[in-house]
Image (cartoon, coloured by chain):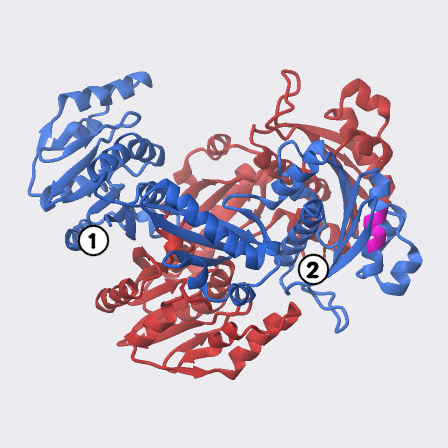
Chain colours: A blue, B red
Amino acid sequence: MVNAKIISVGNELLIGQTTNSNATFISEKLYSINIEVKKIVAIGDNEVDLMEELIDSEKYYNITVITGGLGPTHDDITKSVLLKFFNDELVFNEKIYENIENLFKIRGIKTPSINKEQAMVPTKALIIWNRIGTAPGFCFEKDEKLYIALPGVPYEMEEMMNNSVVPMLTEKYSGGVGYIKKSKTFLTIGISESSLAEMIGNVEDIIGEHKLAFLPSLIGVKLRVDVSAETNEQISEILSKIESKLRNKIDEYIYGVDNDQLEKIVGNLLKLKNLKLATAESCTGGLLANKITDISGSSEYFLGGVNVYSNESKVNILGVNESTIRKYGAVSEETALEMAINVRELFKSDIGISITGIAGPDGGTDEKPVGLVYIGYSDNRKNFVKKFLLGHLRLRNKIRAAYHALDIIRKELTKE
Amino acid sequence: MVNAKIISVGNELLIGQTTNSNATFISEKLYSINIEVKKIVAIGDNEVDLMEELIDSEKYYNITVITGGLGPTHDDITKSVLLKFFNDELVFNEKIYENIENLFKIRGIKTPSINKEQAMVPTKALIIWNRIGTAPGFCFEKDEKLYIALPGVPYEMEEMMNNSVVPMLTEKYSGGVGYIKKSKTFLTIGISESSLAEMIGNVEDIIGEHKLAFLPSLIGVKLRVDVSAETNEQISEILSKIESKLRNKIDEYIYGVDNDQLEKIVGNLLKLKNLKLATAESCTGGLLANKITDISGSSEYFLGGVNVYSNESKVNILGVNESTIRKYGAVSEETALEMAINVRELFKSDIGISITGIAGPDGGTDEKPVGLVYIGYSDNRKNFVKKFLLGHLRLRNKIRAAYHALDIIRKELTKE
């Protein structure tokens, strides 16, 4: 398989000022055309460090993509290091100079002399045209290995990757690669990484020679399946076999795939069934309603909600019985149930969902510890409450409680 | 100067699925304590590649920080590679096992056998305690060089960096640096970067030879001042001079410094004045209440709120006049005013705050474009509404509207 290394150049990457999202973009593009990125390196604006990386590339990688350090200022070192490495020299390129002049003319500015330098290009490199900026890119080839240098400005680099580098690499390696890779991610909620692993059992039985990765996140564990085969048809077939084996074991925990959002999935279900929702929140303090209304068009199915943070507001606004709170407490199955039933009545909605719990860090007791959460559900056929024991971190508890509430709605709406 | 390398382990980093924001976080932390990150490397879940990186680290770097690959599943390779590299073996650690058991107990789950493996730790390493997850971190020392391994789960890694690694490194390398650097960040809201720059005028008059950076963020522009001097006393003196000059020019826009949160500042003011707050939200859909309740202890001053997303709920639950909505619209000064006054009555609070607007991307007209937001305020002495024109992005509009509402409360509470 053709492999690659990405080198990102820039001090800003090493002091925590900039996240290396350029490398993410390039990796994704290369992965999509079956080139395996084996390593991503970020170094400063430092000639020696870049030279060492090129020497390393020469030994191990078919393709090296360098971003950054092609600008016109004193700390841009990529071009000069490439010249040394390939024992090359610069020539003036009329066409690039015209392009630079044009870019400044559009902005009504005379070309600064510092940018004229950018029309000086290596003799041994193929020029990669920059349609939207002043720094051209370069592609050197030596001993059948490619060294591609692109600017670090994200939109310039992205344009050049999409319109020049990807087409060039696809052509060069077509027929030489022999197989295609694809990944699919299954999003789970309500189960720990290790319990999932136990339920899945022997990984090889499910994925064979392909790959399965467990990726824990705040909401739940993501399972990423990476498969490779010779044709798209084979890929689809393999993926659907793996999916059915996975779903056979853990389907009830899977709420979506790839970039699905639970709040959007629930919204789509509500729209499809023409049902209206209302929320009653205590410990999540509006987070659930906030997540629901992050989705554009949520006014079609979300009527609103109440954040009844104090006991008085639970009684006065939501009509929870004072005696229920006195007898069982604000954090109880009984209170959660009344909250769900009453908010449905108050908003005249089809579904009422409620959350009451102890977010922490204070307020916990032995009997009712921090992380204890009750979620109530009410529709025209049934009312019920589920109990959860989350963790001891306030913000995580709020988020997890809100997503568990969404998942309860999802499960109810997909039952029939 | 003490230098460092960061190694991030995980296939997801090489296929463009995950951006390496862990490395950004670690770089920033190390930079803040005068440790120079020279190189960041991302590699896959691959034993050989990690071993090669460790061999490279041994030659060139004082500190190597590794993230990822410490989980309990088959693709987690960091621990086994470290064992080989340091010629070490595993022992069972009772205390870590108790911690793991506790984490599962809180969630009401029996510890899965796969997690017991995580209590097996290297004999030669210092254990870095993980307060919120099952994977402990390790710190090996060899030939005066440190090798620190942390989990890849961001919130666990961040907690361990903040509470264990940074204090450890600060102590180890204190005294070796020779001069002190310190930065202070001033947080502003309600003013653009360019207007701030105009008001501040000549930067050198304010900061002399020190540094001032303008950092735009979602909520407002942050101004970071970096100063350096030989003693802590000098640092304090320089910083306080700069602060008074800055506040002289832009004080009304500064709501806090460094890691201050506006929702916490407002909460403290409410507590201090013994005032209770209630919220009425339309376009922000619960985000304001959610931010307020992110602060532990907010039940002392936050009674609750309503998310009146539909017009019916504005009328039925909040008692807004039907004629007001008919005549002026749900997004209007008049509706915002009634919402603020009525929510104060409904919850019997001292202050009522309301938000109604068009979050977008749809629903805008020429007269009332996307981004138009009215925020209403009501207390026992006055009622008023402020109008804002935000942007065209839904989630940003929600956040900016919520923070403008908090800032209105802050300004009212600091007036006398």
Residue A71 seen in this snapshot: no
Distance from disc 2 to disc 1, alpha carbons, whole Å, reads 49 Å
**Image: magenta residue range:** A337-341
Residue at image x 39%, y 68%? Answer: B149
Q: Quadrant of residue A326?
A: bottom right
Residue type pointed to by label 1:
Asp
Residue at image x 50%, y 66%? Answer: A201
Q: For this view, does A31 lie left or right of residue B191?
A: left
Residue nearest the observer in this picture, B317 or A120: B317
Sequence-earlier tag: 2 or 1? 1
Figure check: A183 above or below A373:
above
- Please state the chain letter of the residue tagged with numbered disc 2 in the rendered image: A
Residue nearest the observer in this picture, A87 or B347: A87
On the image, the x and y values in percent for residue A119 come to: 17, 27
Quarter placement of the C terminus of chain A: top right
| Mark drawn on residue A359 | 2
On the image, the x and y values in percent for residue B140 come to: 35, 75
Residue at image x 85%, y 59%? Answer: A334
For the stretch drawn in magenta, the main secondary structure is helix
For mark 1, what is the residue?
A: A49
Residue at image x 51%, y 43%? Answer: A259
